Image (cartoon, rainbow, N blue to C red):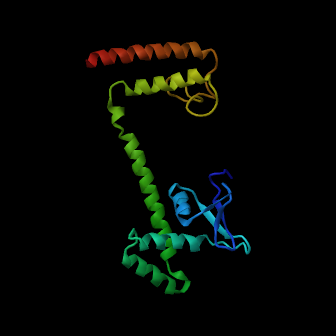
Amino acid sequence: MAEQEKPLLIKRYASRRLYNTETSDYVTLEDIAGFIREGREVQIVDLKSGDDLTRQYLLQIIAEHESRGENVLPVNVLNDLVRSYMQPGGGVMPQFLQASFDMLRDSQSQMVENMSAMNPMAQIPGFEAMRTQQEAFLKAMTGGLSGGLASGWSGAGSPTEGGAPAEESGEDLDAIKRQLAELQEKLSKLK
């Protein structure tokens, strides 16, 4: 599992101090809230017993934010949460909340994608040619190194098998020159 996929391990000492095992320093609840806001999962365990205390601390973070007037949860939702604890088996609230947050996260991702698709720069004449030129330039400058934008793309913006062969470098340069001339011609027409 990659480093960013693993939860950040926080150990709680007997003194109730919280210790970040990645950076080898003590952290506060606010620091942990910051890690979570940045998209990082955390796991908080008691050093002595090994008990998982994550849920307890996450609830404490929420309670502190709510007590400072950062009201995210309406009172009726809090009432429903309390009621769900009174139901045998917890009712359907946990599954409902998980599904609701999953839908919210998916909707936010879709909205970001839509915003990118509606990029006003994409409407400028010659933008696509300029983007293609940038890809070809990056490929030429990195010498077809693997990884990132430079590999696996030809100057025309279509995938290639493992990057461009060496004999295509001259063709790429010619393509860049042609695209630059086309772009200059379009720009002169705009004036």
Q: Could you say which is closer to the camera, residue 171 or residue 75?
A: 75
Would you place residue 163 above or below residue 26 in this image? above
List x then y, in percent, for residue 82: 46, 82
List x then y, in percent, for residue 23: 66, 54
Q: Quadrant of residue 167?
A: top right
Report the side of 83 relative to 124 (left or right): right
Q: Is residue 96 visible?
A: no
Q: Quadrant of residue 118?
A: top left
Outermost residue toward the left? 191
List x then y, in percent, for residue 100: 45, 66
Report the side of 62 relative to 165 (left or right): left
Identified at 40% across, 13% down, the residue is: 181
List x then y, in percent, for residue 15: 67, 73
Identified at 51% across, 26% down, the residue is: 135
How many labels sit on residues? Answer: 0
> Quarter holding the C terminus?
top left
Q: Could you say which is closer to the camera, residue 22 or residue 148?
A: 22
Identified at 53% across, 81% down, the residue is: 90
Q: Could you say which is closer to the camera, residue 17 or residue 168?
A: 17
Would you place residue 175 above or below residue 123 in this image? above
Outermost residue toward the right? 48
Q: Is residue 119 visible?
A: yes
Q: Quadrant of residue 142?
A: top right
Identified at 64% across, 30% down, the residue is: 146
